[in-house]
Image (cartoon, rainbow, N blue to C red):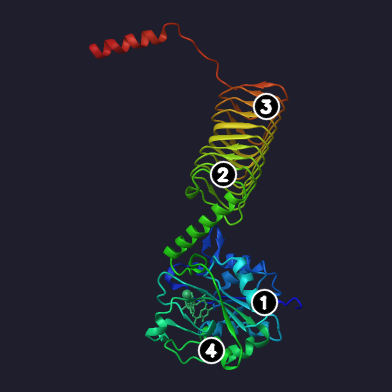
């Protein structure tokens, strides 16, 4: 068989009123990625020839978010069948396979899309393949009426009789339609039903009347769950996270307590990475092989090179670039800074807008004073430099290679390589001062 082309139509015109949000439903994120992008991302794995997102009126933010995917506006929304027809122009003359997906069904995997396409292209050549599942509670889902192994029709719960409602096999909503018939079949859909809507699901019975076949591919309930409310959004997040944890463990990552680690959709982890309990990955993180991240770290927009150790209780913010074998310890915050190979900031520090050389040592309580209320300034710390505890480095400032900053210093001018800089006030010593002080106070208490 010659390679057939694929077109993807994503339905997203529904209002999503149950989210009670000013953000369009399909832009609500799961693992930091908008639901509609999860769907587009999975579908992109099919290398579709064209992708079209069907939106409602006034959904410009979604149109901007999905660019460069093409957008069609369905106004007013008269049902799922009507929604696919909003893409008619893009499908005109298309003779490949049309994959219809819902933007609020974000957990469907590429494997499932592939299984549906394979079934569509099998020898018995069904014109339509429907994704089915067996939910614990079939409730309002459309029911798949299968007879002698063939899908006869889909009946919406509202329109179903008692026998049909007893069917456990339900419609997940996704469909693959042979593009050679798609527009003819879609145009034949009417709206004589309980809702007065154009049901995409009616396409199955219409196809059969015309002597075409329909088939079912089944998926797990977790994979096809729809998101209509915040509670369902949280459930989808939980399902996604559980899936991702297993994926990373399969890829050679150790998670001490998997249920407490949260990833973003774009998190990249190497092999032999070990992650302790309660670690959160925001967007844009990549971690190389052999890194250890101890408990209670928050990491976002950061890169960590192999062999580094992070945490416990460390915060890596956007632009943190941690070098090989570096150590970033407890209550250390790093923002937009490059930390050289083997450098250490082990306790209580803020490093922002800085470049720290290899093997440098940043003492406890070191702060880069990077912000003057208007602009951010750079702090440069040379290779092998040693910054004593509780030092403030007022940027812009440069500490040379091998230089030493005495504890408690406030550094406002550059320090030469191998120099010592110390700004501490001289220490006073009062012999017997403490004893005298105590005696004085003891008399007061008695007196
Ligand atoms: C649909 C199916 C039902 C299935 C269920 C699975 C139909 C008629 N019914 O019902 O068999 O069990 O999904 O979740 O298809 N949309 C538009 N324009 C419209 C209407 C909907 O773009 O005019 C979009 C929505 O944004 C959503 C998707 O289509 O992404 C599904 O619409 P929804 O109203 O949720 O369909 P269900 O009633 O859940
Ligand atoms: Mg729905």
Q: Residue at x 61, y 55 (%)?
A: 266
Marks 3/1: CA distance? 58 Å
**Circle 2/circle 4 CB separation < 8 Å:** no
Q: Looking at the image, which is closer to me, 201 or 72? A: 201
Residue identified by numbered label 4: 205
Marks 2/1: CA distance? 39 Å
**Circle 2/circle 3 CB separation < 8 Å:** no
Q: Which badge, 4 or 1, comes first in the chain's sequence?
A: 1
**What percent of the width, then of the height, locates residue 257?**
49, 45
- Is residue 140 shown above or below 192? above
Q: Is mark 3 within 8 Å of ligand 1?
A: no
Q: Which badge, 3 or 4, comes first in the chain's sequence?
A: 4
Marks 4/1: CA distance? 23 Å
Q: Which numbered dot is residue 7?
A: 1
Q: Is mark 1 within 8 Å of ligand 1?
A: no
Marks 3/4: CA distance? 76 Å
Task: Answer left or right for 295 relative to 118.
Answer: left
Residue identified by numbered label 3: 385
Q: Which numbered dot is residue 254?
A: 2
**Circle 3/circle 4 CB separation < 8 Å:** no
Q: Which badge, 2 or 1, comes first in the chain's sequence?
A: 1
**Local SS, label 2:** strand
Q: Quadrant of residue 131?
A: bottom right
Q: Residues within 10 Å of mark 1 (few under 14, many from 20)?
A: many
Q: Which-is-in-front pick, marks 2 and 3?
A: 2
**What percent of the width, then of the height, locates residue 67?**
65, 69
Q: Which quarter of the rendering shows the C terminus?
A: top left
């Amino acid at each position: 068989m010659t390679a057939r082309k694929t077109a993807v139509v994503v339905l997203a015109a529904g209002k999503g009123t149950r989210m009670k949000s000013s953000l369009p439903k399909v832009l609500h994120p799961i693992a930091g990625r908008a639901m509609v992008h999860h769907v587009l991302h999975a579908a992109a794995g099919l290398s579709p020839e064209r992708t079209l997102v069907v939106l409602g009126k006034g959904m410009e933010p979604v149109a901007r978010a999905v660019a460069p995917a093409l957008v069609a506006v369905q106004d007013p929304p008269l049902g799922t069948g009507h929604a696919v027809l909003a893409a008619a122009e893009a499908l005109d003359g298309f003779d490949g396979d049309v994959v219809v997906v819902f933007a609020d069904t974000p957990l469907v995997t590429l494997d499932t899309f592939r299984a549906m396409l394979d079934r569509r292209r099998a020898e018995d050549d069904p014109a339509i393949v429907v994704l089915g599942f067996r939910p614990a509670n079939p409730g309002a889902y459309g029911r798949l009426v299968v007879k002698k192994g063939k899908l006869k029709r889909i009946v919406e719960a509202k329109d179903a009789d008692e026998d049909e409602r007893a069917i456990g096999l339900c419609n997940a909503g996704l469909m693959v339609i042979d593009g050679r018939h798609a527009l003819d079949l879609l145009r034949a859909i009417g709206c004589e039903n309980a809702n007065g809507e154009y049901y995409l699901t009616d396409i199955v019975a219409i196809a059969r009347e015309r002597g075409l076949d329909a088939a079912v591919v089944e998926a797990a309930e977790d994979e096809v769950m729809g998101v209509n409310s915040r509670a369902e959004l949280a459930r989808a997040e939980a399902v996604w996270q559980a899936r991702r944890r297993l994926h990373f463990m399969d890829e050679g990552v150790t998670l001490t307590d998997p249920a407490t680690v949260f990833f973003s959709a774009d998190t990249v982890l190497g092999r032999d990475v070990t992650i302790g309990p309660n670690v959160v990955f925001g967007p844009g993180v990549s971690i190389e092989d052999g890194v250890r991240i101890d408990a209670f770290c928050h990491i976002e927009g950061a890169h960590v090179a192999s062999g580094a150790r992070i945490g416990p209780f460390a915060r890596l913010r956007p632009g943190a670039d941690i070098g090989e074998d570096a150590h970033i310890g407890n209550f250390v915050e790093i923002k937009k800074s490059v930390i050289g190979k083997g450098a250490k900031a082990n306790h209580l520090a803020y490093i922002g807008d800085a470049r720290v050389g290899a093997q440098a040592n940043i003492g406890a309580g070191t702060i880069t004073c990077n912000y003057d209320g208007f602009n951010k300034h750079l702090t440069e710390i040379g290779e092998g430099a040693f910054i004593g505890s509780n030092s403030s480095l007022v940027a812009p400032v440069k500490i040379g290679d091998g230089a030493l900053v005495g504890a408690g210093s406030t550094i406002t001018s550059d320090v030469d390589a191998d120099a010592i800089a110390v700004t501490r006030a001289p220490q006073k010593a009062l012999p017997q001062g403490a004893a005298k002080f105590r005696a004085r106070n003891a008399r007061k208490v008695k007196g």
